Image (spheres, rainbow, N blue to C red):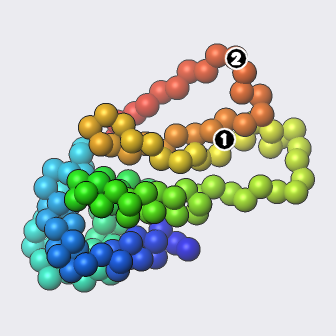
Amino acid sequence: MSVQKLLLQTLENMTNDNFKTFKWYLNLEIPRGHTPIPKSQLEGATREEVVTKMTESYGQDKAVAITIEVLKEQGLNGTAEELRNAYVGEITPAPSGTSSSANSSAVIPAPMVSAQGGSVIVAPTIQGGATGSWNITINKS
């Protein structure tokens, strides 16, 4: 399932009141580090139009992270967790029946984790030769 369909499915499972509140949050500073979507572009917008606007404004991965962040702000933690799990299932490749040394140290996306301030992080899992020292750089975008 595509990210847009996943986001749409999440928004379709919301009540009209929760959807209205969701759009209100998108107009605030909740997408930390991102320009809020102007109120005029969200007023009267359908769920499909909101998904399109979010993916155009933030890109697919960040649209998911922002959706999870907004859902948590709304107290919809179960819905946020369902989206996170569905998204991780989409981006994590299924294990193959064959293994090779070239794939033994592949980096596979891991579940998103919450960070200080309610942000969402997609953390990599390193498989195979994961011993030794690792330097990790986190860039704020």
The answer to which of marks 2 and 1 sits earlier in the sequence is: 1
Is residue 114 depicted above or below 62 in this figure? above
Q: Quadrant of the C terminus?
A: top left
Label 1 sits on what residue type? Val
The spot of residue 102 in percent (x, y) is: 83, 40
Q: Residue at x 12, y 77 (%)?
A: 43
Q: Cα distance, mark 2 to mark 1?
A: 16 Å
Could you say which quadrant of the image residue 80 lies in?
bottom left
Residue 60 visible within the image: no
Q: Secondary structure at mark 1?
A: strand
Q: Which mark is residue 66?
A: none
Q: Residue at x 14, y 82 (%)?
A: 44
Q: Residue at x 38, y 54 (%)?
A: 65
Question: Pointer 2: what residue?
Answer: 132
Say whether residue 122 is left or right of residue 54.
right
Query: Which sits in the foreground, 115 or 4?
Result: 115
Could you say which quadrant of the image residue 64 lies in?
bottom left
The spot of residue 7 in percent (x, y) is: 40, 70
Question: Pointer 1: what residue?
Answer: 107
Q: Residues within 10 Å of mark 2 (few under 14, many from 20)?
A: few
Say whether residue 55 is left or right of residue 93.
left
Q: Quick one: which residue is furthest to the top in this view?
A: 133
Say whether residue 113 is left or right of residue 42.
right
Is residue 117 depicted above or below 131 in this figure? below
Label 2 sits on what residue type? Gly
Could you say which quadrant of the image residue 93 lies in?
bottom right
